Amino acid sequence: MKYKEFLNYKLSEMGIGTYLGNTDEETDNNYYETIKLGVYKGINVIDTAINYRGMKSERVIGKILNEVDRSKVVISTKGGYITPPPEAKEPARWFKEEMLGKGIISPEDITQTGNVITAKYIDWAFETSLKNLSTDYIDVYFLHNPEDQLLNFDRDNFYKKLRVVFRLLEGKVKEEKLKYYGLATWNGFRVSPDSRQYLPLKDIYDIAVEVGGENHHFRFIQLPYNMAMPEAYFFKNQLVDGEYVSTFEACQKLGIYTYTSASIMQTRILGKIPEEVVKLLGVNSQVLAAIQFVRSTPGVGTALIGMSKKQHLEENLKIEDIPPADKSVIDSLMKY
């Protein structure tokens, strides 16, 4: 397994995502077996979110963390979407009593997509994730799709929320419950600066500096990147030091590590990659071509791939026996 050095971490170039799947016991067991095998094979990055499979993905990871050396794995999770626990048989009642009734959320905090990033809610979500994960600390905590806030609130309001939540998360670092934090996005870093959901990385970075000083802990972002969604590499939409650069370039300039999500587009990209592209990438299958494209792109830190079955893990790990493609190959594929 190849690793990337960043700050005090060595992060595997491939990470396990836990988004997809039913909330049943069979899926729990599949994830458990796959993640355990992945850790044994050298994957040390595991990504989840409080809302993935209704908290059950976090809880599976928590079970594993009780059985492995915690210091050898890098756990990231996310908060931002209202999520009842599996025990809540009546979600609407739970929301009314636990969220509204206890003042954790106010109706005006919620976007049309169910996104909330107030300090009260993120504090609740963070502490709940900590319990679900059965751990004393989280390595990376992401605000989940914060650009959804811009569908309902203006930028000034959004930046005020970020300041308050960043202050909360810097506090979690001081309490030794958190190592680093960041933003996990879908649209925010891929769209043009005139888009409503656009996120200017440098401005957000500056908020972190304002809140946490030069030694702030805003050091990670997550965004989709694959052959069908290559904007993070080629679209120069981020203003840093007076020039527009790609999101990957901006991260390199600012000292931010990137997790890429949707690396194989939840398998939807498979079967659509031209055979000449597969050969150009130096591999012999659609899935390896998809992974090869992502992990060979300059600026990619860890490529996250959803894996709930051991056979998929074994297939994906074949990429480790193949050298990455040259930058010139990746650049040439932008014409397809």
Image: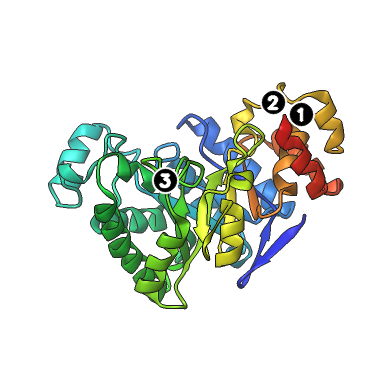
Q: Which residue is situated farthest in the left direction here?
A: 101
* Residue 305 pos. (x, y %): 63, 41
Up/down of 64 relative to 97, above or below: below
Upstream in sequence: badge 2 or badge 3: 3
* Residue 330 pos. (x, y %): 76, 42
Residue toward you, 334 or 229: 334
Tag 1, which secondary structure?
helix
Total number of numbered discs in the rendering: 3
Task: Please name the residue shown 54% across and 33% down the image.
Answer: 27
Q: Are marks 2 and 1 in contact (CB under 8 Å)?
A: yes
**In which quadrant of the rendered image does the N terminus lie?**
bottom right
The span from disc 2 to disc 1 (Cα, nearest Å) is: 6 Å
**In which quadrant of the rendered image does the C terminus lie?**
top right
The span from disc 3 to disc 1 (Cα, nearest Å) is: 32 Å
Residue annotated with mark 3:
198
The span from disc 2 to disc 3 (Cα, nearest Å) is: 29 Å
Q: Is residue 84 visible?
A: no
Task: Please name the residue shown 54% across and 57% down the image.
Answer: 75
Task: Please name the residue shown 16% across and 47% down the image.
Answer: 106
Q: Quadrant of residue 257?
A: bottom right
* Residue 91 pos. (x, y %): 25, 34
Left or right: residue 306 versus residue 273 is left
Residue annotated with mark 2:
270
Which amino acid does the dot numbered 3 rest on?
Tyr
* Residue 87 pos. (x, y %): 31, 39
Which amino acid does the dot numbered 2 rest on?
Leu
Which amino acid does the dot numbered 1 rest on?
Gln
Upstream in sequence: badge 3 or badge 1: 3
Residue annotated with mark 1:
286
Residue toward you, 252 or 258: 252
Left or right: residue 17 versus residue 194 is right
